[in-house]
Image (cartoon, grey):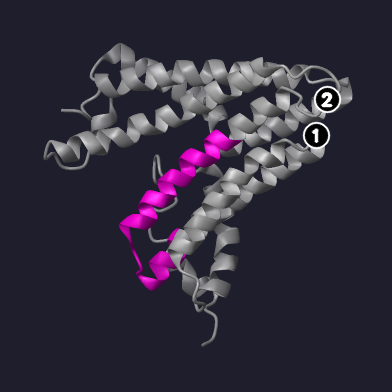
Amino acid sequence: MPKPSVAELRPVVHPPGVKDRRSGEHWAGRLYMREISLRIDRHLVNTRVTPNQLTYLMTVFGVLAAPALLVPGIWGAVLGVLMVQLYLLFDCVDGEIARWRKQYSIAGVYVDRVGAYLCDAAVLVGFGLRAADLWGAGRIDWLWAFLGTLAALGAILIKAETDLVGVARHQTGKPPVQESASVPRSSGMALARRAAAALKFHRLILGVEASLLVLVLAIVDQIRGDLFYSRLGVAVLAGIALLQTLLHLVSILASSRLK
């Protein structure tokens, strides 16, 4: 069976709205990864590889970001970015193959969400362990490992807060939440949310952004000759994660999503 062309794949696997989803599409997907994934799709659509198998592979790459970041120096940070980019690639490919073959499954959606949790957590835990200087000649400073784990916990809780809205509505017989329901009822809360969205500081604890930050800080540390900026970065991300966990919870409670 001949491989479909990119032009044949595009309208099927990228239907209207896929790239415009407010909370379901990463900026990197819109910017470049969806175009790369199309080139991968055409080599996979006629194989026996299933969308769920690709989702499992996606999850493996996300988890591998943690051990990759333990490699000392800039190369560990580069490997971390590579693992996260492969995670993002297969996060695009699995759904696109599913659309082309019309093979949808609840298990696939579930594992996809688990993979998103694990990737964010892996990068932050790996960053904390990296800042603790596991392979250095001196004493391991476990404070940074703790702060990295704290940041990872915050990143997971933020995703859980969002997903649990759907769980709460389903268990009480309510229909899925509408986009308009996410708007806070309080004008002050709405203003605060718009300000946070404009600054986008909360995105730093997501896997893609965090891995890129780790790379930038690794380069600066290489020039400086120590781990000062990586440790500063871990502390900042832990603070962002804790603050965002609280603000996100308040935002949900102040909206109509639980009504």
Relative to residue 117, is residue 81 drawn left or right? right
Position of 12 relative to 189 (above/below)? below
Residue type of the residue flagged with mark 2: Gly
Q: Residue at x 87, y 20 (%)?
A: 224
Q: Earlier in the sequence, mark 2 or mark 1?
A: 1
Q: Residue at x 84, y 20 (%)?
A: 226
Q: Residue furthest bottom?
A: 1
Q: Which residue is mark 1?
A: 72
Query: Which span of residues is magenta-colored?
Result: 95-122
Q: Which residue is mark 2?
A: 136
Query: Which quadrant would residue 250 be assigned to in this image?
Result: top left
Query: Which quadrant would residue 237 be assigned to in this image?
Result: top right
How far is the residue under mark 2 from the one under mark 1?
Answer: 9 Å
Q: Residue 102 in magenta?
A: yes
Q: Position of residue 256 (x, y in %)?
A: 20, 26
Q: Residue furthest top?
A: 188
